[in-house]
Amino acid sequence: MRVLLAEDEHQLAAWLVKALAQSAIQLDWVDDGRMVLPSVQATRYDALILDLGLPGRGGREVLAQLRAADQRLPVLILTARDSLIERVGSLHEGADDFLAKPFQLAELEARLVALVRRSRGGDHPRFTCGALAYDAGSKQFTLQHAPLALTPREHAVLRVLIMRSGEPLSKREILERVFGDDDDVQPDAVEVLVHRLRKRLHGSPVGVRTVRGLGYALHSEPPAGEPS
């Protein structure tokens, strides 16, 4: 999962970047409200954590700008302004959720996962692609109801793909979501990991297909007798 954090408290932001990385959430960080829309337009994020008290352009103005630009990215408001008026106002203005400071990391992570799940049109606590399922709580994959054994990097790539099931992701996008700012990792590593995943999924109705010019996409074949 790749998330943009708009927060001007540098100590808090630095801590969140490191802490959420332990849960395989890649956090990109900006500290000025004027940087949010350009960042969202340049990178495909799964969610935005938005502080209301940003310099340059306040959080509410940023939110209005995003919605006016038809950016439907899920937005979680993170702020010290914990009042009913602030919460209700933010939700009416287009926010999807609201979390007041101070907060527990586990709650922030759970709310992010729920936001992304809802944005994909499902209330089930898992991401699925046919017979393949990923439980965000246990961080486990199952294939045809059996646990799927994966290396940590295979797990990370497959998680990225299932969260965008059916939607092609370029090698560069996968690389950034899995390895972050590790400059030592080359795009060829994605090809190797996709090859390994195809072998893991071989014989099942789920596979990773190459979409020419766009990248890789996770897909599932319909059961025999059903139209494709």
Image (tube, helix red, strand yellow):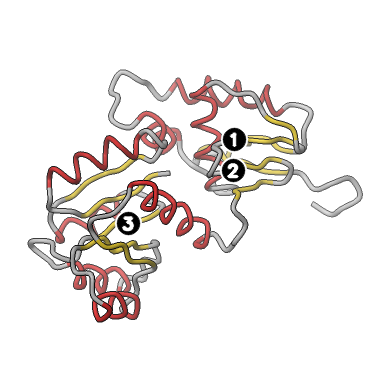
What is the C-alpha distance between the residues marked 3 and 1?
A: 25 Å
Q: Do the residues labelled 2 and 3 touch (CB within 8 Å)?
A: no
- Between label 2 and label 3, give the one nearer the viewer: 2
Given the image, on which type of amino acid does mark 3 rest? Leu
Asked whether, in this view, residue 91 is left or right of residue 157, the answer is left
Q: Residue furthest left?
A: 56
Disc 2, SS: strand
The disc placed on residue 140 is: 1
Dot 3, crowdedness within 10 Å: few (<14), some or many (≥20)?
A: many
Disc 1, SS: strand
Dot 2, crowdedness within 10 Å: few (<14), some or many (≥20)?
A: some
Disc 3, SS: strand
In terms of sequence position, does the residue under pointer 2 or pointer 3 come before the other? Answer: 3
What is the C-alpha distance between the residues marked 2 and 3?
A: 22 Å
Q: Position of residue 116 (x, y in %)?
A: 47, 56
- Between label 3 and label 1, give the one nearer the viewer: 1
Relative to the observer, which residue lies in front, 24 or 79?
A: 79
Q: Where is residue 153 in the image (x, y as percent from the top left)?
A: 49, 24
Q: Do the residues labelled 1 and 2 touch (CB within 8 Å)?
A: yes
Q: Position of residue 128 (x, y in %)?
A: 64, 47
Q: Mark 2 points at which residue?
A: 135
Given the image, on which type of amino acid does mark 1 rest? Gln
Q: Which residue lies furthest to the right in this view?
A: 225
Q: Quadrant of the N terminus?
A: top left
The disc placed on residue 48 is: 3
In terms of sequence position, does the residue under pointer 1 or pointer 2 come before the other? Answer: 2
